[in-house]
Amino acid sequence: MNDRSKTADWYADHVLADVELFAGVLERGPLDAAVAACPGWDVARLAVHLGTIHRWARHNVIHASPPEDTSAFKPERGLDGAGLAAWLRAGAAELVDTLRTLDPEAPTWHPFLVAKVAGVWPRRQAHETVIHRWDAERAVGSPSPIDAELASDGIDEYFELGVSRKVTREQLEYPTGSLHVHCTDVEGEWFVWADDEGYHVERVHQKGDAALRGPAEALLLRLWNRTS
């Protein structure tokens, strides 16, 4: 489950820091640099995606229901790099103000197979933001490091929330066998498997059919199909 020692403020601070790095990419350009992890996308389109997600998530926190239309969350057409950066920062600032004051147990809406409580959102938006910040920086050069504690938390969220979402959304089947994942630089260890009773995650040291071991950032990027 979500690490309760990590507060909404902790996640919000990471959102702002990573948005600032992404905004720097937009200001420097080029906006048409290809994003390797998102085939067919460039940096400008990735920025629109992330800024829209920030506004969409804020709506879900405030209204506890999904928006009927997301067109109002999009930027105006034809913005240059500085304009896109300002738009991205503005949406993140509004999101963060909302995340810092939410009741984590308040009802919300989200598309994930976990409890529909607002405490999901600070964590989800921090990890959405850091992965796409990494994508943007990599598109134009060398990415800044991902904080190891944040990366370890992101691995935990991936197994708790991301796997079941991907399987459900893409109508996939859970892989057979088991996997042991172990961070070597910060705390973080998981044993993951699927069987006839479903999908399971335990935070224990246990030998699996396969193993991933390494720094938290490298493991997180590998799980999200990014090659560091």
Image: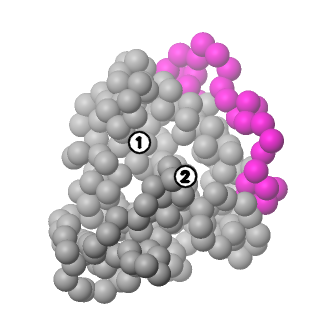
Relative to 161, 219 lies left or right: left
Relative to 106, 130 lies left or right: left
Instruction: Tell which circle, 1 or 2, labels the residue nearer the N-terminal end.
Output: 1
Circle 1: residue type: Arg
Name the residue located 79 percent from the left edge and 60 percent from the top edge. 64
Residue 185 appears anywhere in the view: no
Q: Is 64 one of the magenta-colored residues?
A: yes
Q: Secondary structure at mark 1?
A: helix
Q: Nearer the viewer, mark 1 or mark 2?
A: 2
Name the residue located 67 percent from the left edge and 59 percent from the top edge. 110
Q: Secondary structure at mark 2?
A: helix
- Magenta residues? 60-86
In the rendered image, residue 225, in percent from the top left (x then y), is placed at 31, 48
Name the residue located 43 percent from the left edge and 61 percent from the top edge. 173
Q: Is 80 one of the magenta-colored residues?
A: yes
Q: Residues within 10 Å of mark 1 (few under 14, many from 20)?
A: many
Instruction: Please name whichever residue, 14 or 64, is drawn nearer the observer in this view of the structure.
Output: 64
Quarter of the image for residue 208 reads bottom left
Q: CA distance from mark 1 to mark 2?
A: 24 Å
Furthest toward the top, the residue is: 78
In the rendered image, residue 128, in percent from the top left (x then y), is placed at 49, 50
Name the residue located 74 percent from the left edge and 64 percent from the top edge. 108
Q: Which residue is mark 1?
A: 133
Quarter of the image for residue 153 reads bottom left
Is residue 164 shown above or below 74? below
Is residue 119 shown above or below 77? below
Q: Which residue is mark 2?
A: 169
Relative to 217, 30 lies left or right: right
Instruction: Please name whichever residue, 224 or 124, is drawn nearer the observer in this view of the structure.
Output: 224
Circle 2: residue type: Arg
Residue 156 appears anywhere in the view: yes
Instruction: Please name whichever residue, 197 or 102, is drawn nearer the observer in this view of the structure.
Output: 197
